[in-house]
Image: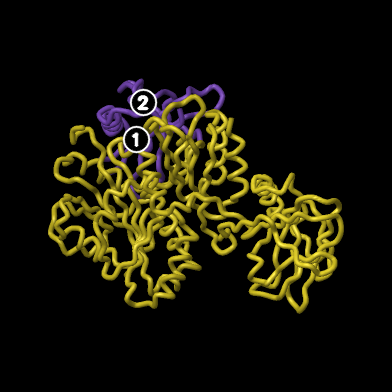
Chain colours: A purple, B yellow
Amino acid sequence: MLGRPKRDIALIRQVKEWVYDSLPVSAEATVSIMELECHEAGCPPLETVIAVMEKGKETRQWKLHKPMPEITLADIVELATKSSPPQDR
Amino acid sequence: MSIANSTVPVTVLTGFLGSGKTTLLNRILSENHGKRIAVIENEFGEIGVDNDLVIGAEEEIFEMNNGCICCTVRGDLIRILGNLMKRRDKFDNIMIETTGMADPGPVAQTFFMDDEMREALNLDGVVTLVDAKHVLLHIDESDEVKEQIAFADVILLNKVDLVSSDELDQLEARIHAMNSAAKIYRTQDTVVDMDNVLNLGGFDLDRALEVDPKFMEPEYPFEWSGLFELQAGDYRLVLKSGPDPAMNLTFRSAAEASESAMRDTVEKAVLAFSDDEVALQTGAVIEPGEQLSQINLEGEDLVYILRVPAAGSYVLFTEHHPDEFEAFVTDAEGNRVDASISREYKPDHEHDEEVTSVGINTPGDLDLEKFQSWLRDLLANQGPDIFRMKGVLSFSGEKERYVFQGVHMLFDGRMDRPWRDGERANSLIFIGRNLDRNALNAGFNACLT
């Protein structure tokens, strides 16, 4: 059906906490998480976009090609090993 | 539902500097209306009420572009609201004040973009304060004023004591032409019943329909049509000069002399009115068909010839009401021939305003895949110009109504409740800049099964 699935707020907050703890993100930054439907060939139907917004800096974004409930701490830690967010705009 | 699980209604308050936002906020915070309200004010706010639920914000706007979705959001709000929700038991509603020059888009998009905001809060309504005395100085050149009006669920036309009732009527008509879904209240010193500002259910289309039952009625590029029963031969359309120098019309055949036959020609007439017009001078011949004729209405004794190839029923669609030009039809001998059926249409305001509303109200069921594909393409291409959209849809095979609302490229929707007998229909409205009414209608209709 049209529209994004409903998610437990505790789950969203957990993933946000992992981002603050594991990625190079200052406590003043805003972390935003959004599940998106993807219509590109070869992509899973739902992917999760992590955006980090900091005053005076360009928004940084990472994408995980899986729905939010499947994201683990290990996924976020692995993102940290990449020197910069993937530029898959 | 427990407090921990229920969403908090959020009201966004917009309006130009001096329109009365601070006065309204102070009243909301000090009046006894039984609601505990947390206020996020802009950093230049001047709220005079001492309250630990009043929080200053810095309007940090961030752009996001990830290929599928481009949007601008308020990063500071995500942070502030996230913290505020830890004190969820302390308040019932949240009100967010924006600066006078702010485009309400980033605030509204924040509630559709971030998943935590989407689950914990609901955008209950956008309330726009308009200074009735000074708005006309800005409305033509200020994108912010247009957007603040376009985004609104409620418009408080404030300082009405400073203008005449004629000026107010004109201003209200103009605002209504831009955003026909908003409820407009005339106020002095922002005195308004709090029930008209808080807990609006901005997403509730049933309520929007209560506001103005006509707002879903389609608007047409013509104001009048008349069905004539004519014999083969030439007839004369006689007019006098009037308020406009020219007028578009189309003349076409109908299957029979009935209201339903005239109605069947309306859609094609709308299409004809979207074509380029053929300019005609007095004395010109107009034959039935797809042509959009633009007849000159300057000068005395204006006569155009309606050439009828065979006896039958014919419909004349005119851009303006014929009475404005004292228009009538005669046969070749000068005997007056009246339309046996005529209808007046709600005028189309599109030519007046860059920002308009397009309502679609159509029976039938939608094919989910077709609709998804149409909406996706529409938002990808025209999302920046679509400020708001909301609707109730009937999907094929679904027993429940689907209700949705959106802001620019983002939207959210859900199944609502089962359809009642005889109720199934699709109602939606787009409010935006340079909207193509005919293309939106055609695109939507192509998604019906």
Q: Secondary structure at mark 2?
A: helix
Q: Which residue is painted at 59% across and 44% down in the image?
A: B441
Position of A8 with respect to B87 (left or right) is: right
Can the viewer see residue B185?
yes
On screen, residue A61 above or below B171: above
- Count of numbered marks: 2
The N terminus of chain B - image quarter: top left
Position of B128 with respect to B83 (left or right) is: right
Q: Secondary structure at mark 1?
A: helix
Position of B79 with respect to B344 (left or right) is: left
Chain at tag 2 = A
Position of A54 with respect to B253 (left or right) is: left
On screen, residue A50 above or below B282: above
Q: In this orientation, which residue lies closer to the viewer: B169 or B121?
A: B169
- Which of the numbered marks, if any, corresponds to residue B414? none
**Disc 1 packing (10 Å; few <14; some 14–19; many ≥20):** many
Picture quadrant where residue B9 is located: top left
Q: Which residue is mark 2?
A: A68
Residue A10: x %, y % from top left: 25, 29
Q: Which residue is mark 1?
A: B115
Residue B187: x %, y % from top left: 30, 67
On screen, residue B47 above or below B93: below
Name the amino acid, label 1. Asp
Residue B58: x %, y % from top left: 29, 55
Q: Which residue is painted at 74% across and 44% down in the image?
A: B255
Can the viewer see residue A83?
no
Name the amino acid, label 2. Met
Q: CA distance from mark 2 to mark 1?
A: 10 Å
Mark 2 and mark 1 residues within 8 Å of each other at the beta carbon: yes
Chain at tag 1 = B
Residue B189: x %, y % from top left: 26, 70
